[in-house]
Amino acid sequence: MHPARTVRAALAVGASLVMLASACSSGTSTEPEPGPSNPAGPDKVVYLTGFNASAHDAFIFVADEKGFFDEAGIDVDIQLGAGTQNLGPMLADEAQFTYIDLVGLLYQMGNGQVEPGAFRVLSAVHQTTLAAILAPESSNIQSPQDLVGKKIGAFAGSPTEFLLPVYASLAGFEFDKSQIVSVAPTELFGLLPAHRADALSTFIIQKGVVENAAGEPMRVFPMNEVLSDMLGTALISTTALAESNPDLVTRFRDAALRGLEYTLANPEEAIQILSDRNPGAVPAIPPFVAQINVMKPYITGNVDKIGAIDESHVLRCISVLESSGLIPSGLTPDAILGPQTLMAS
């Protein structure tokens, strides 16, 4: 069985921890467009979702359901993915596209876990990190400074874990790594009700899930308020595919972004499509719609067109990771950017 599929049951609770959705350029229309002529038939590709079947993954199912890939001459097999576990199948050419947290990808490249230049960013999804700290409203945590000495749960290996010391430094409070309660996705949301953590470092779109698990409202401290240079998520392919078939990756990119544009404009329909395509993955429509609405400013902000990557933003992100000691010096934007990247003007 494909490794990306084996996580479906075990990681359903943590489906949105590695995020991913973005939009298409502001000038891209969602009206049907004729696909390229291909006598041999459509190009067949495999796409791995960011993490299982979550609200932030809805856009790819929408693009498929609305026929945007068909119009681009692409037959896409959407399989459920598992964050950074998607990278191995892509390098083995078992899958051709996914979307991933860029801070995590740069972190792995900088630390030698992934070869710099092995993957090509095709477009942004979220422009800045969705990482946030959530604390119960009933607690005495009313500001980031109140996190001193508190236990903070985080998904092991995620940017929500390794960015905590950087966030603390910029937010102005003392932090010790012993405060981190590092767990698997299936354990994270149970930490608050079990009193194993005082707060959670997760992604902001998980607020509703955390509140349901904890049984009370949460205060939210978005990391991008002080870590605005941290990138969000992106659609990626392998560099080998981008160089050997640039037309395919460009057509895929644009069709996927049309799906995201449609998702932002029609969140209820998008979540219904996600639910129909993944029975049991959407317990209730409204909370998933709320996640789409929470994501909107992360998708549409900071650049002149939705989905565009700003090279200077990539450089600033790398600089912060280097200056914080999270990666050694030497990584450059061309480790992830290339001719098929949708660049900001």
Image: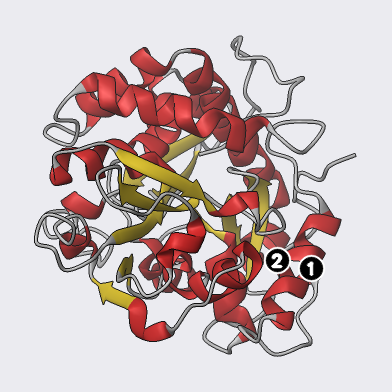
Mark 2 crowdedness (10 Å alpha carbons): few <14, some 14-19, many ≥20: many
Local secondary structure at mark 2: loop
Residue type indicated by callout 2:
Ile
Local secondary structure at mark 1: helix
Residue at 59% over, 40% down: 252
Mark 1 crowdedness (10 Å alpha carbons): few <14, some 14-19, many ≥20: some
Which quadrant of the figure contains the C terminus? top right
User: Can the viewer see residue 42 in this picture?
Assistant: yes
Q: Nearer the viewer, residue 44 or 151?
A: 151
User: Can the viewer see residue 20 in this picture?
Assistant: no
Number of the label disc, if any, that sits on residue 336:
2
Residue at 69% over, 61% down: 244
Residue 170 location, quadrant: bottom right
Please give left or right for residue 144 compared with residue 188 in the image. Answer: right
Residue at 52% over, 77% down: 174
- Percent x, y for residue 117? 69, 74
Q: CA distance from mark 2 to mark 1?
A: 6 Å
Please give left or right for residue 63 compared with residue 314 in the image. Answer: left
Q: Nearer the viewer, residue 17 or 243?
A: 17
Number of the label disc, if any, that sits on residue 333:
1
Q: Mark 1 and mark 2 in contact (Cβ < 8 Å)? A: yes
Residue type indicated by callout 1:
Pro
User: Furthest-top residue in view?
Assistant: 31
Which quadrant of the figure contains the N terminus? bottom left
- Percent x, y for residue 147? 42, 65
- Percent x, y for residue 152? 33, 68
- Percent x, y for residue 324? 67, 81
